[in-house]
Amino acid sequence: MSKQNLLVELFVEELPPKALKKLGESFAGVLFETLKAQGLVSDESVVTNFATPRRLAAHVTAVAAKAADKQVAQKLMPASVGLDANGNVTPALVKKLQALGADESAVAQLRKENDGKADILFLDATQAGATLAEGLQKALDEALAKLPIPKVMTYQINDGWESVNFVRPAHGLVALHGTQIVSATVLGLSAGNSTQGHRFEAKNATITIQSADSYAQQLADEGAVIASFGARKAEIVRQLTAAAAKENLTPIDDDALLDEVTALVELPNVLLGQFEQEFLEVPQECLILTMKANQKYFPLLDANGKLTHKFLIVSNIKPADPSKVIGGNERVVRPRLADAKFFFDQDRKKTLESRIDGLAKVVYHNKLGSQGERNARVVAIAKAIAEQINPSLTAKVIQAARLSKVDLLTDMVGEFPELQGIMGRYYAQHEGLDDDVAFAIEDHYKPRFAGDDLPRHQVGVIVALADKLETLVGLFSIGEKPTGDKDPFALRRQALGIIRMLIDGKLEVSLSDLTTLAISIIGSEQIQKEWSLKLSQLEAANKPATSGDRMVATGYVGRAMAPGALENIKEFIFDRLANNLREQGSSSQEVDAVLSLTPELLSEVPARLAAVRSFASLVEAPALAAANKRVGNILKKVEGELTTEVNANLLQEPAEKALADALTAVKPKADQLFESGDYTASLQALAVLKAPVDAFFDNVMVNADNVDLRNNRLALLNQLHQAMNRVADLSKLAS
């Protein structure tokens, strides 16, 4: 059958820029896969997606006008139901054949096939392949139904009566197979071969597409449109780089902004603008944010990464004289920058310390109180951590924790919430506070996302740990644990932040100690708050308090202080750690082997993983892992307390004596290496146990009839098990 290239375009009003890239990829991808599922394209066919502010399109190579017919086997019913005892057709079979569009003459085509239980009747038939018109209609319907539309709008189509739902009103549909129009209808539009180019720059108002392969070139030549999202993005990068190079400057690197600007223009034209240098007195983060977020400009940086008073504009038009476009953009950005300067000047008139009381008026969570109450909890947790990690930093930690949230009350952060922490650092530096304190105010939000930097100094690390622990434990205490893919308070991110600081920061502090500390502080505060509330209620009712009232008052905190709270939070953190390690390339077996021991010092996890990986490469590893699993299963079945004390006088068999001797020889060395932190060498030292362990299981009956012999052999196995599983649970490596 003849194969030609296919072009499909849906012409619409301006699409949401932040969604355009995904919309274009989805439209082309689903269209292609649906055509492929119907046999209209082959594995050799290639799909190219196009996406501009006003169109979604796809070009597919080697598309058949009609899919090939195929043989299908239609399962009917058990032979005992479709045929009577004499082999004649039953009414049930006749009815089934009629439903499939066949008659009794099709009986000759039936065949029997046993499914292991009974003979089943099948009808072998030829299914006609779909025509391109049929297949494209189905593909279009599927592509539109699966578009990741952020928000649907309802509008009337041209007949003035019927309404449809789509991301934006659609005004045209192109469907060309080679040069031929393919019949299709969507959103009240019938397929044709004409579209529109750029609103202002197109040579012709309407462009007639000659063939599927001429689409992109015609749009470029006649419509002044770069149809490919990728090509348009590359052209913007080229122009940005060239324009910045003329000024010996560098445009800010922001891929999300680049994608958004690419989705706003069809014919990019980069122009240079500037603003008054006096605005550079404002922290550059504020100026950069307002230019990027509000105006979609690309700020220009000097060789030292400092913001300059120049910026780049990506215009959608190419006038002969661009001065009016540049001047208009400069006039628009100036009030934005003036607002930022005003906020900055006003905020500095009040000290951070003077704003602390205002946190009491800001609600954090209706069950956890105000930001002031939360801040007090963070201070208490941070103080306790500092006293454990580095007591000399306690005073700085307390000050940084106290001031960590007060910039939420400033005008600048009120206007630009993304600057929380950053502005606190600037205001702290303006007041002459210690740099450790100032940077901790900014850094206590870090790491904010995967790959983000850790806090720069230990003061910031301690406050960040306290902040994330307070969030995690506090929200767990009121039942806000994430479920499925829902995590409204980003607790998974908080847990990963704790993990990274403990591991990457190499902090030798116990996870249980940290979590217990946070639980105790949050619990005691909630008890006090609930008891005070109850007392005030009783006082208002003129009733004396009883012990029962105290139980009611403290009942709220039960969830935070209940038995198992520590284990639940640790389990949540270890679950995030396990996922993170797998994403970084560790195998599930390696991760399970290390984390099944729930090591208290997360800073040791990378070394333990490396040791397990090295051990697994040894030739003795599979046998030792299998033996370890066998030992573990034996010990699990033992009732009562196990000991590791082996009585040498009760060792009878040569194999058990050999194992005991081998353990006596190797265990001290392995333990010494473990204690020194050389986990790899510690595990490798155990490799010599393979031969005696194999001989033991080949020649020794563990569950001997004699109780003393049995208990002594179990003690030997328990000693072996403990020696082998200090670094990781090696049984997890067994296949």
Image (cartoon, grey):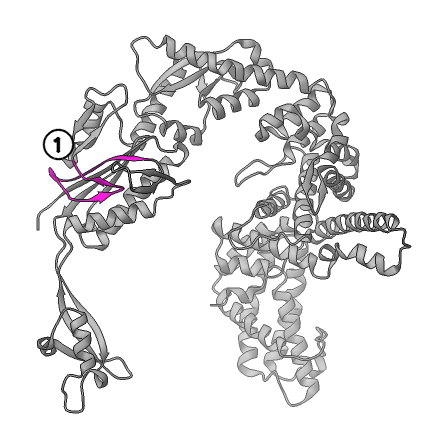
> In what element is the residue under mark 1?
loop
Q: How many marks?
A: 1
Residue at position x 11%, y 78% in the image: 107
Q: Quadrant of residue 266?
A: top left
For the residue pair 132 and 670, the one nearer the viewer reads as 132
| Residue identifier under label 1 | 210
At which x and y percent is residue 628? 56, 70
Q: Which residues are magenta?
A: 169-192
Q: Is residue 283 left or right of residue 116?
A: right
Q: Amino acid at mark 1?
A: Gln
At which x and y percent is residue 598? 63, 58
Q: Is residue 622 left or right of residue 571?
A: left
Q: Is residue 364 left or right of residue 284?
A: right
Q: Is residue 353 left or right of residue 107?
A: right
Q: Is residue 247 visible?
A: no
Above or below residue 540? Residue 371 is above
